[in-house]
Image (cartoon, rainbow, N blue to C red):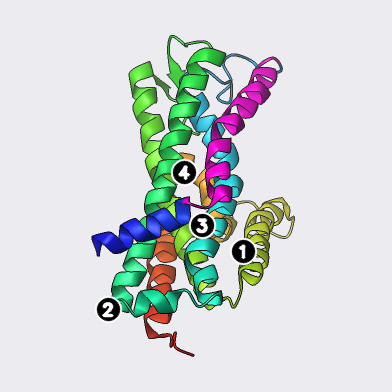
Amino acid sequence: MGQLIISEFERLWSRWSIRLLVLALPLLVIVTGVYFQNHNGNISTDAVEYATALNFPILSISEHLFVTFNILLIFICAYVITEEYQQKQIKLIVLRAYSMSQIFLSKFIVMATSLFICFFLYYLASFFAGQIMFEMPERSILFVSEADVTNTEMVLYGLNYYGIAFLTSLAVLSLFCFIAIIMPSVNALLGTGICILFFSIVGPQLLEQSTAFAEGSNISYVVYASITKIQYTGISLLLSGGELSGWLIAVTSFYLLVFLGGAYLVFTRRNYYV
């Protein structure tokens, strides 16, 4: 199975578009850094969103996690799953005496590993960009709770943030993996994936701004049923240990387990010889 994983990994990373998207991540970090440099000039240095050398990696990933990284996941799923089925290439893998469970597991490992590489590169790029483009604070302020912490604690907070962000992206990967398996073509996957991404971002925003929900209602639970909303603001809430923490964990686990399980069942029971 190790050879199968290596083969899948080489096939994915031989794509110039995937390499281009990954190589564009440092440039994205620099552009985001310039934005926050300008933003700093309009807010107080005591503001939570004031960018420093230590919180910039968090501010940067929070701006791109729910859009840029999710679009990247759609393309990864398209290349690893949908295109192979569309072009009947998967028949060649089936004929190599690998079980469907092994093939599915190898594909998911390759996609998850590729996602981890992107996170690792993005963290390194944003960390070093933060050191160069922003000042080192004497102490740092946590998001949501606004607790005053040491710089060492802020670095650990940032690592925890990236860890949870990676888990939420695995949940999104499970969702897009399921969609990729049932879609008949790459174009169908791209169109469906972008639409789902759009409505999962806009929907919670409209609910929050709606006057139909009175203050003190359970609208927050509905809003944070969206995995992209969790990616955008839910991670900070989870790290603050608020009352929604259990719900955020449950929703993320639901996406990860249910859609990954559904993807596995559909993939392993499909007839690839027709």
SS at badge 4: helix
Which numbered circle lies on residue 147?
A: none
On the image, the x and y values in percent for residue 127 come to 45, 24
The amino acid at mark 2 is: Ala
Residue numbers of the magenta segment: 14-41
Residue at point 32%, 60% (across, down): 5
Q: Name the quarter where the N terminus is drawn.
A: bottom left
Residue that badge 1 annotates: 193
Residue that badge 3 annotates: 76
Q: Residue furthest left?
A: 1
The amino acid at mark 3 is: Ile
On the image, the x and y values in percent for residue 14 come to 48, 52
Q: Nearer the viewer, mark 2 or mark 3?
A: 2
The amino acid at mark 1 is: Gly
On the image, the x and y values in percent for residue 18 come to 54, 49
Crowd around label 1: few <14 · some 14–19 · many ≥20 (10 Å): many
Sequence-earlier tag: 2 or 4: 2
